[in-house]
Image (cartoon, rainbow, N blue to C red):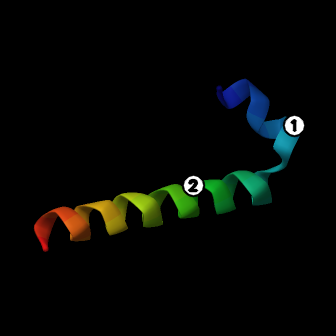
Amino acid sequence: FYRDVHRFGFETFRKLAEAGTKLVDDATAATEA
């Protein structure tokens, strides 16, 4: 997976990671609610 990061570019990968983190946070919040 990490071999492909350079194909997308670091900025895109960082945004993807941030979106993933937000998704997890939202799911956790929904589970705890």
Secondary structure under tag 2 reads: helix
Q: Horizontally, is 32 left or right of 11 in the view?
A: left
Rendered image: mark on residue 24: none
Q: Position of residue 18 (x, y in %)?
A: 55, 63
Label 1, label 2: how far apart the Cα atoms are: 15 Å
Residue at image location 24% in from the left, 62% down from the top: 28
Q: Position of residue 13 (x, y in %)?
A: 70, 51
Front in this rendered view, residue 3 or 21:
21
Q: Horizontally, is 31 left or right of 13 in the view?
A: left
The local crowd at label 2, few if under 14, some if 14 to 19, many if 20 or more residues have their Cα within 10 Å, is few
Front in this rendered view, residue 8 or 26:
26
* Callout 1 touching callout 2 (CB < 8 Å): no
Q: Position of residue 22 (x, y in %)?
A: 45, 66
Rendered image: mark on residue 17: 2
Residue 29 placement: quadrant: bottom left
Residue at image location 13% in from the left, 74% down from the top: 33
In the depicted structure, whether residue 25 falls above or below residue 16: below
Secondary structure under tag 1 reads: helix
Q: Amino acid at mark 2?
A: Ala
Q: How many marks?
A: 2
Rendered image: mark on residue 7: 1
Q: Residue furthest left?
A: 32
Residue at image location 65% in from the left, 26% down from the top: 1
Q: Horizontally, is 28 left or right of 13 in the view?
A: left
Q: Horizontally, is 15 left or right of 29 in the view?
A: right
